[in-house]
Image: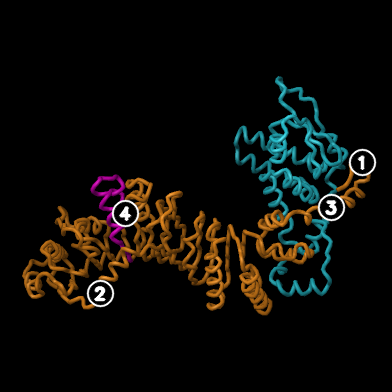
Amino acid sequence: MSSSTDSPTLTTETTQLSPQPDTETAKPTKKITLKSSDNQIFEVEESVAMEFATVKSFFEDSPSTDTVPLPNVTAKPLSQVIEFCKEQIKFKANPDEAQKKKYNAEFVTEKSDKDLVDMIPVANYLEIKDLLDVLNQAVADRIENKSVEYVRSFFGIDNDFTAEEEAALRREHAWAYEGVDED
Amino acid sequence: MEETASGDNCQNLCEKANEDVISELHDDILCYMLSFLPTKRAVATSILSTRWRNLWKSVTILDIYDGISGYYKNPSTYKERKMNFVNFMDRLFIHRNNPSILKFRLSLAQSYDFTCVNAWMSHLSRWISSSAIMGNVEELIFLINFQVRLPENLYCCQKLVTLKLHGHIRIRLNFVPYDHSYRKKLTIDTQNLEFLKLVDFASEELSMQRADSLLQADLCFGYQTGVFNVGIEEYANMVVQFYRQIPGVKTLSLSNCNIRNLIGAAVSKFPCFGNLPTFRNLIHLEVRVCDAYVWILPEILQCTSNLEVFVFILDENAYDWNWRAPHSVPQCLSSCLQVIEFNDFEGVSGETEMVEYFLRNALVLKKMTITYLTDLKTSEVDVLKRLSTCPKGSDACHIVIIPEHETTEVANRRRACSRRLATETY
């Protein structure tokens, strides 16, 4: 497993991204409250929340709700996903493909392996296709030439094959295990 | 999932959090994730755990490259890796016996045994025939460094957006019933292509990238009136642009449909007609044309400057013979044209006038061969007499008149030509 020492603790991160009173905008925009599985509350602008297809359809079904519970999503990946979507809204308003590409690349580059992996189920659950693509590409880039052992550790996968089964599979697809980088 | 994060020991937190959140995801999501990897690496995930064992078999984007060029220096390793790759390819088609595919990319840097590549291609062809692929595949890319014939049913893929070919590739793409719902676009971007045979009545948009290396082109594509949505002038412009990208051809064969587009451009005075290139390297020109369009021949000959052989084939005789001697004689007639072949001669007077024009104006002509159909309208002797007495520009010219015995073959050839609704790229 590659280290994730560059990432701050969850407590710090969520505090930073907790809702701040929006002092800059004169006209208050509608806010939507999201509640993570670990009971963190996120207040996000409606436009950002509507990027989450799951949240959007939740509101379409029950428009009077004020808090959307997200039982499958923990605070840290959620805060990062919100960060990403806030930027995407800006690009929607002022399309600039080059800048968007640059932002997306930087967004994933600065994340730890674990951050990336943890965001995938969230992006999937919230149905944010652009983010899912960005994350999948980033993960693919990080594991492309890595050994099986490295990839297991990357995802936190427990190997439940017997040694014999694993050896047989390795023989069957010998070509697939050639040419990997040193871990 | 972990509870509210409150621990202040980061190390503990990370270890605790290092749960397998990925394996819990639905198959579709994992396969989608694997589609971002080259197929080689996607297959390698089969031994991560039992959960992953068969996931790669459902990935809808295949990106296969042999990637063994680095092992040249060590012959035994090279041989082993190559064998492993061949085994993989052989099994790929067996493992995925009911595939659904969006994208397929095959990049072979090495050459492989002919029969084994043929087997892969016939498997691929079978895949394509399965409705799951024919209905869905969007992208097919082949980068292959040896001669291979691609499956014929590629063009039947209804949602195919991209087809890229690189290498010594021969494909024959069969025409599918025309679908109005979208325009087919054909892009040929093949810098090193040497021989191109293109028969295409389906693509409304043609885009030929510069191909200086192209030596031989056999072109049969044309506007489909009442079927194409693209304007006729726009299409004619694309045809002329196409010619402009292949200035180096030595041998060129133009079909009646190509000629018809040029006629349309000439008659309607489209500006593109004036942009026809000069084929300076062109030695051998074959033109199939119907009797009503023969007046365009001098215009086409004007586009050559070193032509030696001119072959004329009557494509249809459905209309009236329409020959008009041009105001100025094409330059190749007076300087370089040595051989003229005139096929399927019928002996009508316009035809004979045209032959006489060439005999009179071709100053360095060595041989004029006329093959005639057995139902010749004027007797052979009369034709010979008339042609032998007509003024000739070249004293050395030898006239040969021979019957076309295999008339059924000629008839079949003509029918085949007008029916061959296919695209061929070599």
Q: Which mark is residue B6?
A: 1
Instruction: Name the subunit of mark 2.
Output: B
Q: Nearer the viewer, mark 4 or mark 3?
A: 3
Q: CA distance from mark 1 to mark 2?
A: 90 Å
Query: Which residues lie in the magenta part?
Result: B251-278
Disc 2 element: helix
Q: Which mark, residue B408? A: 2
Give, as a three-letter code, the residue at label 3: Ser
Q: Position of residue B34 (x, y in %)?
A: 69, 58
Look at the image and tell me whether residue B400 can be seen: no
Image coordinates for residue B40, horizontal then vertical, percent: 67, 65
Name the secondary structure under disc 3.
loop
Check disc 1 and report its element: helix, strand or loop.
Answer: loop
Q: Earlier in the sequence, mark 1 or mark 4?
A: 1
Spatial separation of the CA atoms under disc 1 and disc 3:
20 Å
Tell me the colour scheme of the image: by chain
> Is tag 2's residue or tag 4's residue first in the polypeptide sequence?
4
Magenta region, mostly helix, strand or loop? helix
- Tell me the chain of label 3: A
Position of residue A171 in the picture relative to residue B135 (left or right): right
Asked whether disc 1 touches disc 4, contact meaning CB atoms under 8 Å apart, the reply is no
Do badges 2 and 3 share one subunit? no
Q: Residues within 10 Å of mark 1 (few under 14, many from 20)?
A: few
> Residue type at mark 1?
Ser
Give the cyan chain's letter: A
Q: Marks 1 and 3: CB-CB under 8 Å?
A: no
The residue that mark 3 highlights is: A3
Q: Residue at x 25, y 64 (%)?
A: B315
Mark 3, residues whose alpha carbon is within 10 Å: few (<14), some, or many (≥20)? few
Q: Secondary structure at mark 4?
A: loop
Q: Quadrant of residue B324?
A: bottom left
